[in-house]
Image: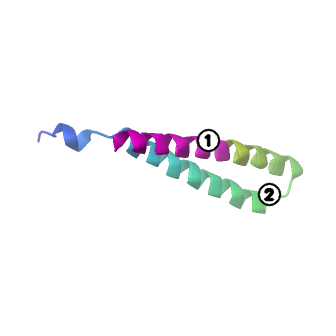
Amino acid sequence: MKLEKREITLNEFDSLKDVFYTEKTLLNEYTCALAKAERKETRGELMRMIKEVGEDLCFVRDLMRGSSIENE
């Protein structure tokens, strides 16, 4: 069975959307873990990771906005 090019092509916006939802899920998991964390060190590390993922999430969202403008 031969796949046509359009069947296997993933555009930039779709890739960014996948990354965005993965980061969003990761952020949710970190906040759930933070609610259960008892040790101060664990909470501090989770807060650091939440900040990092939040920044990544905003960065990817900005890329998605730029990508969707270019595609129109």
* Pick the front one: 67 or 56: 67
- The verdict on residue 55 being magenta is yes
Give the residue pinned by disc 1.
56
Q: Identify residue type, mark 2.
A: Ala
**Crowding at mark 1 (Cα within 10 Å: few <14, some 14-19, many 20+):** some
* Pick the front one: 60 or 70: 70
Residue 51 sits in quarter = top right
- The verdict on residue 36 being magenta is no
Q: Earlier in the sequence, mark 1 or mark 2?
A: 2
Q: Which mark is residue 37?
A: 2
Q: Quadrant where the C terminus lies?
A: top left
Q: Between tags 1 and 2, which lies in front?
A: 1
Q: Is residue 4 left or right of residue 68?
A: left
**Whole-percent x and y of residue 6?**
21, 41
**Whole-percent x and y of residue 29?**
64, 56
Q: Is residue 25 left or right of residue 42?
A: left
Q: Identify residue type, mark 1.
A: Asp
Q: Secondary structure at mark 1?
A: helix
Q: Quadrant where the N terminus lies?
A: top left
Q: Is residue 16 left or right of residue 48?
A: left
**Crowding at mark 2 (Cα within 10 Å: few <14, some 14-19, many 20+):** some
Q: Secondary structure at mark 2?
A: loop
* Pick the front one: 40 or 31: 31
User: Which stretch is magenta?
Assistant: 53-72
Q: Coloring scheme of the render?
A: rainbow
